Amino acid sequence: MSEIKVNKISPATGTETTLGDASDDFLLPSGAEIKAKSGSTITIESGATLANAGTATGFGGGGKVLQVIATNMTVTSRTTTSGSFVDLSGFTADITPAATGSKILCMVQINHGTSYQHHRAYKLFRDSTEISNTSSYYGGSDLAPQLDTATIVIVDSPATTSAVTYKIQWVAYASGTRYLNKNSAASYTALPSTMTLIELESATVTTVSS
């Protein structure tokens, strides 16, 4: 292997120096560094790609958005009469985290109606693991024709780079029927119900329990 030792490389003419030819690779040995001095700029021109298969550090801290996955449910044909929790068909979102340390911000809004009273209950799952739920009871058969909205927001830590599926389960109470995106008389609709997954490089979560 040939070796050239110099303290400085400058262009013979103009202000640019080209290293090698197309398809050439320049290898940086383990432990070596390329340093940009204060006041200098490294520019990635349009059409070029900066690929990272290692660890990128020092880019303004964590919390950067890595990807966004969203499901919009606009159908009004989904109903359930089940007295136990069952999958809300089609209301899922799949995401493949870029890193095991990534956090997934899950935001779910469910527009719904019921044929009997106003008892709502939903569960959010990551694959087969329940990670959050919401439940409330307003009572009174006079509320049956109304539309309501249930919301679940949580920061999840799947700790994997394999694909995961987030899904919603729902339940009907007191021999009633639950409707997605409409009331029991179908006289009111609210579209869409949504599930949004935002992968964050990192996140700080503070739990207040008292």
Image (cartoon, rainbow, N blue to C red):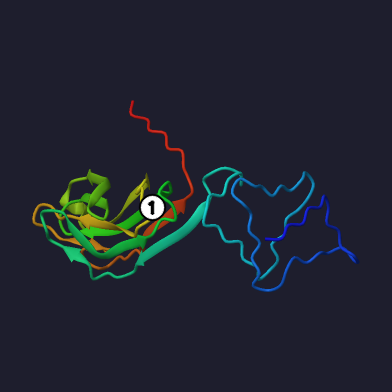
Where on the picture, by quarter, is residue 81? Answer: bottom left
Q: Is residue 146 visible?
A: no
Query: For the view shown, which residue lies furthest in the front direction?
Result: 1
User: Going by the image, does 164 lie left or right of 22?
Assistant: left
The relative height of residue 196 versus residue 45 in the rendered view (above or below) is above
In this rendered view, identify the residue nearer to me: 41 or 126.
41
Pinpoint residue 44: horizontal percent, then vertical percent. Answer: 69, 62
Query: For the view shown, which residue lies furthest in the left direction?
Result: 175
User: To which residue does mark 1 refer?
Assistant: 107
Where on the picture, by quarter, is residue 27? Answer: bottom right
**Residue type at the position of mark 1:** Met
Quadrant including the C terminus: top left
Residue at (79%, 46%) from the top-left corner? Answer: 39
Q: Is residue 168 visible?
A: yes
Query: For the view shown, which residue lies furthest in the top direction?
Result: 210
Query: For the view shown, which residue lies furthest in the right direction?
Result: 13
Residue at (74%, 48%) from the top-left corner? Answer: 36
User: Going by the image, does 203 lie left or right of 60?
Assistant: left
Pinpoint residue 11: horizontal percent, then vertical percent. Answer: 86, 62
User: Going by the image, does 140 lie left or right of 50?
Assistant: left
In this rendered view, identify the residue nearer to me: 91 or 59.
59
Pinpoint residue 196: horizontal percent, then vertical percent. Answer: 40, 58
Which element is circle 1 on?
strand
Quadrant including the N terminus: bottom right
User: Going by the image, does 153 lie left or right of 30?
Assistant: left
Q: Residues within 10 Å of mark 1 (few under 14, many from 20)?
A: some
In this rendered view, identify the residue nearer to me: 91 or 102.
102
Q: How many marks?
A: 1
In this rendered view, identify the residue nearer to me: 200 or 143.
200
The relative height of residue 209 versus residue 94 in the rendered view (above or below) is above
Pinpoint residue 163: horizontal percent, then vertical percent. Answer: 34, 60
